[in-house]
Image (cartoon, coloured by chain):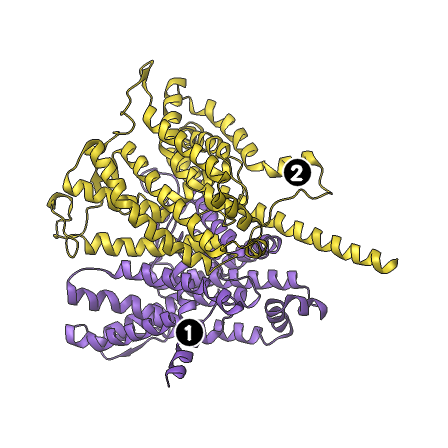
Amino acid sequence: MMKKQSSSKKMNPGVYFLINYSVPIIFTILVAFAIPLSKLSANYFVTEIMIRLSRNSFLILALLIPVMAGMGMNFGIVLGAMAGEIGLIFITDWQIVGMPGFLLAILISTPLAIIFGYFAGIVLNRAKGREMVTGFMVSFFMNGIYQLIVLYGMGNIIPILNPSILLPRGYGIRNAISLIGIRQVLDKLIPLKIGGILIPVATFLVITTLCVFIAWFRKTKLGQNMRTVGQDNEVARISGINVERTRILSIVISTVLACYGQIIFLQNIGTMNTYNSHEQVGVFAIAALLVGGASVAKANIPHVFIGVILFHTMFVVSPRAGKELMGQAQLGEYFRVFVSYGVIAFSLALYAWRKRVEKENERKKIMGYRKSILVK
Amino acid sequence: MKEKIKSIINSVGLPRIIIFFFLISLFVLAPFVGVSLDTSLNDVIVRFGMNGLLVLSLMPMVKAGCGLNFGLQLGIIAGLLGALTSIEMEIVGFAGFFTAVGVAIFFAVILGFLYGTLLNKIKGDEMVVATYVGFSSISFMCIMWLILPFKSPNMIWAYGGSGLRTTINTQGYWFHVLTDFLKINIGNHITFPTGTILFFALLTFLVWAFFRTKIGSAIIAAGSNPAYAKSCGVSVNKMRIVSVILSTVIAAIGIIVYQESFGFIQLYTAPLYMAFPAIAALLLGGASTEKASIKNVIIGVFLFQGILTMTPSVINNIIQSDMSETIRIIVSNGMIVYALTRRIERAR
């Protein structure tokens, strides 16, 4: 149960702002130092960031709704990514290419994502107060189930027509699948080139639509209910909201969105690592959102875009900066992994610490109030 | 009768029962599919010695109410630093092993203190923060392994490379010093690693004894009822820090024993997920997020390592494919998910 943040009285507003936004502030400074070090051209840089904006934003937007319902960062978006990948495996198998293939993948994976999300929602309802660590473990657990299906079931129990995507032993999907048939179908749907840079107009349109949807969703009855649930489970229950159902719905929506997000991500990349593509989805999406200034209890659309830009700038520049600074690109690689995990650890710890301080202050206030009554 | 079975299932936990019967059936099946039982049994014992301490290390923190130690990697880092230092100093045999342990304890106390202080600031959210503290410190150490000034040619990349290798051989230093100490050969296939088991027994006994001292009982009190402990004059925060330090120290020793038996020191991302199997083993032994005992540790390691050794050999012989890794992922993570969803149910 995550309580709404209210600024404590003692804290100076300036200091409060600094603590609140310490992650984005530190990140901006970091990036400001790393960009000149990397010696990348402005053109390359802008292209990279735009590609990454189009590639990652959808996945990160999928995180917003569970935050609204007070369930924190949804580490379970990995489940949605898996559902999307299963859809992609099927269309590759049936060799359906272009936009029809893309849409069919979405059609196949949507019910799967709903089932996965429903499962995750039920599990998380049984672990109230520690949704994040449980969601994280659920995604690990489901990774095993995914392997069971894809590595042992496909080609065995689930018929696969195209032997070229199977492992040489005759069943199980290969480690890497080429998605050449649907590569950048969405990105290139509406072709537009400015100064030699291809702009994925359609993808940005889809992302904008999702933003509008989320903004609209906040105002619907269900959205309002979610916010109530997010603020206080008991209050929500008393006012007649089915808390369990609302929480499950928020996870289902998030999982389905993550599924689409992963399909969009992979159509841009063009190849799929069957067993690894989804693994880091949760970590990178959450780290980016937190870098954008979001917290476990509050995340908005601007946080997503600030986050993608800051986080992925670091991603682009750090291997180069590492090479220029220390002579080792590997160092930069490790550095960005460290930063991703570090940002999550730091933000979660900061949030948990503040939650505790607020609780303590509240308790003191009540105690003080009681004392004053007694004195009178 | 039905009620009785239900209550037994409830108290032991369905996953544990399923896994227990699964393991039994594996042992029953083994001879029929041509897997020799004594080799498997030997493997289970060896792996018990390897992993026992890592699982034991989780116990003090559970007892102090800090939850499952998802930040086990901090202990591992301390252990790695110890192991590397002893190899750098070219100390071999028992002396080398105990140098490694000594240095590891030094680092573990420092890291444990910092980690414990952090966990005190974030009471209630220990597990999720600990997970990411563990991950980020492992990835931080990845950078460190590249730039720390270790010089031993057995540890750094050959041909002018800089930084430590991903795996470092302990052969020639303290490989199997514990395992081969007083080892007993039973038949052709079983070699009982007396030293490792004795070392495990010794540390287990020390932990057991520790929880019977005054500080030990204070830790248990702080864990089971913080408000009550406070009213008795126990400093809950201090007790939690002591338990975190203890956990980290045992984990540090545990990873050295693991390397001693395994033969390699694994650096970089290898220890990233090491907390999960250990946690799963403890839970399999009957522990929960707020209760754990030495009995849980021993049963858990046996069951978990049993599954890990038996599944590949038996299943491979039946269906001719290696599903062990997948089964390991499902069993260990499924067990953790189960445990995380458990407490709330009771509280209702």
**Residue at (41, 18) in percent of width and height:** A42
Q: Residue B33 carries which label?
A: none
The chain that appears yellow in the image is A
Amino acid at circle 1: Ile
Pick the front one: B160 or A256: A256
Amino acid at circle 2: Tyr
Q: Residue A16 carries which label?
A: 2
User: Decide: marks 1, 2 in contact (CB < 8 A)?
Assistant: no
Q: Where is residue A220 in the image (x, y as percent from the top left)?
A: 48, 41
Pick the front one: A210 or A80: A210
Question: Visible in this render: residue B233?
Answer: no
The chain that appears purple in the image is B
**Residue at (43, 53) in percent of width and height:** A248
**Residue at (62, 53) in percent of width and height:** B121
Q: Where is residue A168 in the image (x, y as percent from the top left)?
A: 12, 49
Pick the front one: B241 or B311: B311
Q: Where is residue B251 in the image (x, y as percent from the top left)?
A: 47, 61
Decide: is B134 above or below A272: below
Mark pair 1, 2: CA separation: 48 Å
Residue B150: image quadrant is: top left
Q: Is residue B283 left or right of residue A363?
A: left
Q: Label 2: how many residues lie within 10 Å, few (<14), some (14-19) or many (20+)?
A: some
Dot 2: what SS? helix
Q: Is residue A316 left or right of residue A144?
A: right
Pick the front one: B54 or B334: B334
Q: In this view, does A336 lie to the left or right of A85?
A: right
Which residue position holds label 1? B298
